[in-house]
Amino acid sequence: MLFTQLGFWAFFLPVLGLAVALPRLLGGRARSLMLLGASWLFYGAWDWRFLGLLILSTVVVWLIALRIESSEGPARRRWLVLSLVFSIGLLGLFKYLDFFVDSFAALMTIAGLPTADDWAIRLLLPLGISFYTFQTVGYTIDVYRRALPAERDFGAFALFAAFFPTIVAGPIQRAGDLLPQIRAPRPILWDDIGRGAVLCLLGLIKKMVIADALAPSVSAVFDAPDPSVVGGADVIFATWLFAIQIYCDFSGYTDIARGVARMLGFDLKYNFLQPYFATSPQEFWRRWHISLSTWLRDYLYIPLGGSRGGPAATDRNLMVTMLLGGLWHGAAWNYVAWGAFQGAVQVIQRWLGLRGRKPGQPIGGGIAGLVKHIVVIALFFQVTAYGWLLFRATSFPQIAGFTAKIFTQPLHSAGLISPPALPAMCGVLFLFLWDLGAERANDQRFYMRWPLPVRAFIWAAMIYLLAFGANTASSAFIYAKF
């Protein structure tokens, strides 16, 4: 059930009706249990075989967290290690085993050593396993650190692990944020319905009007049958378009997930804050996939030592964190290369002493300062876009070939990219103005300051854009495969 399909909304509307009615009839716990059943149904509808794996993982992590809380000393650490080995082991088995087996076989072949025809197991990747694994691992570590108590209500914890708006592609939720909302559900207000509907509408425009419309142009270059005909200009434009596509695709999913959750009475944290207005790598990761970047910071970078061990140790910790962050995205070497690139640009930023601004921080220097700021944004976007080339590439030879074409044939085009349709261009312009308004106001709900007639006109324009510009060949969300 994709968010872009009518089947999802046919599923969601009855769930919303029950979420409104049940607390009045049977109390708040009835709503939570209903949402748990709906979440398991939603997940099982994708592939029922993996529903059992999700429930098994939930039960094991829940039981071990209770033992962690009641234990002391070495026993407490042993229970933590057991939970981490179980959770990360499942993730490694399904997501990375074949990748490492294939990589080892390739090394054997390069070394001239005999290998079996196919050592890999070829396990199917359970939907959303990276997201719910990181959620439950974060919960376990928080219990171990005594940052929060172990959850004794299995139903509440199971809903935290399987909440259907977020299980497919996040945002990654923290137990300290979501569990209190599950334990003490609040009444659903009309304001929740309105705010959630606006988020869903914005997310659908990002995905169906912009991302899906740009996808064919990107594929025409990166999936070209004959890479030799691809020109440097084709690569540059396809990479720019992919930067827009992946932002609209992923932030579109997040908007819909947050909107659906809001209508159900849950407040999920922001996952994107206008990332392409960033002026440095550090600032970019304060704005892009915030739930992942903060998870990596709190549960990996800081435990590794953070910036406490001197410049060399800090650089090492940054590189390890971003390498593993790249690998989290997928079992392929181009994701590792993307992670290494992200780590390298952060290390270089530290060497140069550059500091990005925080979202909402004023821009000083008058007109000259503003012009300089815009130039820096434009230049850093090129750095970010090259990272997306690594992310989207299908092989290392393609990365090397496309990189060479950028610098040797920057003006050559084979005409592989067709101009985006008018609705897509209107959607991109609308999104730019929307993000610019949020950036200037430092408020994601900046539109609430407008008079009601203006807001009504904007909503009508958004509905019109979605109705007449939605791409009928809507595809799965990119981050669903991670």
Image (cartoon, grey):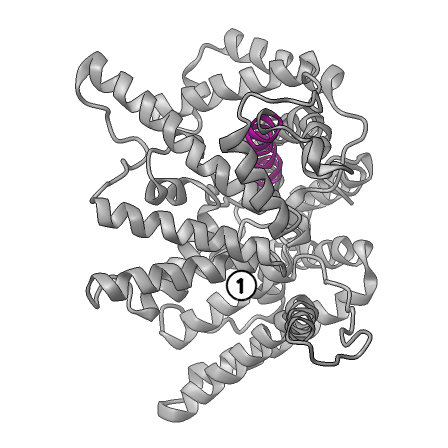
Q: x, y (%) of residue 450?
A: 44, 13
Residue 3: % across, % down: 72, 39
Residue located beneath label 1 in the image: 134
Answer above or below: position of 475 versus 45.
above
- The kind of residue tagged 1 is Phe
Q: Position of residue 408 (x, y in %)?
A: 52, 31
Q: Residue at x 54, y 15 (%)?
A: 429
Indicate whether 450 appears above or below 297: above
Can residue 23 be seen here? The reply is no
What is the crowding at mark 1: few (fewer than 14 residues within 10 Å), some, or many (at least 20)? many
Decide whether residue 379 is among the magenta residues: no
Question: Quadrant of residue 436 in the image?
Answer: top left
Q: Is residue 345 visible?
A: yes
Image position of 295 (left or right of 209): left
Query: Which residue is at a point 27% across and 35% down the rendered structure image?
Result: 357
Location of residue 370 with respect to 315 vertically, above or below: above
Q: Is residue 248 magenta?
A: yes
If the image is split into quadrants, where does the N terminus sit? top right
The foreground one among 418 and 209 is: 418
In the figure, residue 161 lies in which quadrant? bottom right
What's the residue at 58%, 45% (across, down)? 399
Position of the C terminus, as image quadrant, is bottom right
Residues in magenta?
234-256
Element under label 1?
helix
Q: Nearer the viewer, residue 149 or 122?
A: 122
The x, y position of residue 181, in whole percent, is: 50, 53
Residue at 82%, 66% (x, y): give it.
Answer: 49
